[in-house]
């Protein structure tokens, strides 16, 4: 049976900045969730938290799923009341389509079985293993989203990461991910047992004090075959990218049910020195399996130039307004490029190349 290229694509696109806007454009949880946007929604308490870092991500994200996302099961999502005898409180909750765990809104967005989270100092893309949809009580999308949610919360709660300018504090994203993994195991155990596995990759923006001023530094954590990539647009240089982790071809390291992998034992964390203006991408395998590294870099560079120069229909006229929309535009164009390759049965791709090396029949 021929192997087809993956078609679910998730990408978070960010540019590092060092001067905060007067108006912080973080999303409220009441805003609509779509397959594209600037930042994923936050609960009100998180929106009101005062940021302390001198650096922040200016962001955009775009998504494409090969199949619709399944609704989360109770108690994570309250389903519509099926009887007039149900308590009115349940009926009222059924109109709230947001998902919750431990009384908190689940951060991020679900895309098929993927989960994406885009914030001002943390981005992540988890790729849930879709085969769990065929298993009893299988729900990979729930696993990918919960791990990303708990991961972001752990980073946020480690107060010195976001509230001090000290260069002596060292974030520990692997510990955050390990805690998130353990909390997800607990949340999906009896009586609310749900099975699944997911890859995990994320980038945490921090800073160090050097040469008389703060300098941005990126803490990148990866387990599996999603990818974080850092690009310097003016030179098109790929400053950094994560290395895929596989057990064997098309079976990446993953966290969850029956998997031997854990963050503590298998996740890899790198620190990357970056500059203001660098582009940081968190991408699922639906992007990196369909586009080579140089194609990603070229696509990002070309579309940033197109937007900023005003060559895109509908782009704002003023330079300041144009700068605000570039992240979202480039994220959408990158996902579009990956989708075009994925749906072309004759196109060559990195996934096809690896499959042929493994001696497997490959379509496209």
Image (cartoon, rainbow, N blue to C red):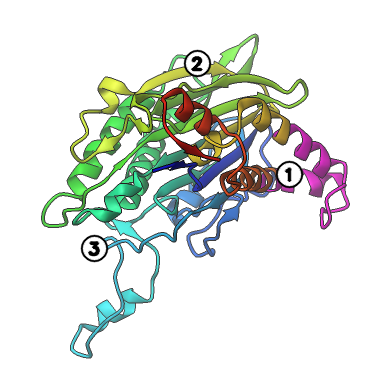
* Secondary-structure class at tag 2: loop
To which residue does mark 2 refer?
167
Residue 260 vs residue 352, the one in the foreground: 352
The residue carrying pointer 2 sits among few (fewer than 14), some (14 to 19) or many (20 or more) residues within 10 Å by Cα, namely: few
Q: Is the magenta region chiefly helix, strand or loop?
A: helix
Distance (Cα) linking label 2 and label 1: 31 Å
Quadrant of image for the C terminus: top right
Q: Specify the farthest residue to the bottom.
A: 84
Numbered disc 1: secondary structure: helix
Indicate the position of residue 285 as horizontal and vertical percent values.
48, 37
**Magenta-colored stretch includes residue 275:** no
Magenta span: 300-329
Disc 3 crowd, CA 10 A, few/some/many (<14, 14-19, 20+): few
**Between discs 3 and 2, the one toward the N terminus:** 3
* x then y, percent, for residue 334: 65, 42
Q: Position of residue 240 (x, y in %)?
A: 57, 19
Relative to 140, residue 296 above or below = above
> Mark 1 — residue?
326
Is 64 drawn above or below residue 308 in the view shown? below
* Residue 236: quadrant of the picture: top right
- The answer to which of marks 2 and 1 sits earlier in the sequence is 2
**CA separation in Å, label 3 and label 2:** 42 Å
Name the residue carrying label 3.
Answer: 75
Query: For the view shown, which residue lies furthest in the top direction?
Result: 211
The span from disc 3 to disc 1 (Cα, nearest Å) is 38 Å
């Amino acid at each position: 049976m021929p192997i087809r290229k993956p078609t679910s694509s998730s990408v978070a696109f960010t540019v590092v900045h060092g001067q905060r806007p007067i108006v912080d454009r973080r999303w409220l949880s009441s805003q609509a969730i779509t397959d594209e946007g600037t930042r994923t929604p936050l609960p009100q308490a998180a929106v009101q938290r005062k940021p302390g870092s001198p650096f922040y991500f200016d962001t955009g994200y775009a998504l494409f799923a090969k199949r619709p996302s399944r609704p989360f099961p109770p108690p994570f999502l309250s389903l519509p009341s099926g009887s007039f005898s149900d308590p009115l409180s349940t009926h009222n909750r059924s109109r709230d389509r947001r998902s919750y765990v431990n009384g908190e809104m689940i951060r991020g967005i679900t895309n098929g079985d993927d989960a994406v989270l885009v914030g001002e100092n943390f981005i992540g893309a988890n790729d849930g293993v879709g085969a769990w949809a065929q298993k009893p009580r299988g729900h990979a999308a729930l696993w990918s989203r919960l791990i990303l949610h708990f991961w972001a919360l752990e980073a946020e709660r480690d107060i010195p990461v976001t509230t001090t300018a000290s260069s002596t504090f060292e974030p520990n994203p692997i510990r955050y991910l390990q805690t998130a993994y353990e909390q997800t195991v607990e949340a999906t155990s009896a009586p609310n047992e749900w099975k699944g596995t997911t890859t995990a990759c994320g980038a945490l923006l921090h800073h160090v004090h050097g040469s008389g001023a703060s300098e941005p530094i990126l803490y990148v954590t990866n387990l599996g075959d999603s990818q974080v990539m850092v690009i310097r647009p003016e030179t098109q240089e790929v400053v950094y990218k994560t290395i895929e982790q596989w057990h064997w071809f098309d079976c990446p390291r993953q966290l969850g049910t029956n998997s031997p992998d854990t963050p503590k034992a298998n996740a890899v964390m790198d620190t990357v020195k970056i500059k203001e203006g660098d582009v940081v991408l968190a991408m699922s395998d639906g992007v990196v399996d369909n586009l080579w590294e140089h194609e990603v870099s070229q696509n990002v560079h070309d579309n940033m130039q197109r937007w900023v120069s005003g060559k895109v229909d509908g782009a704002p006229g003023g330079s300041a307004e144009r700068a605000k929309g570039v992240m979202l535009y480039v994220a959408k164009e990158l996902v579009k490029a990956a989708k075009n390759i994925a749906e072309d049965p004759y196109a060559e791709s990195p996934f096809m190349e690896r499959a042929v090396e493994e001696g497997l029949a490959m379509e496209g």
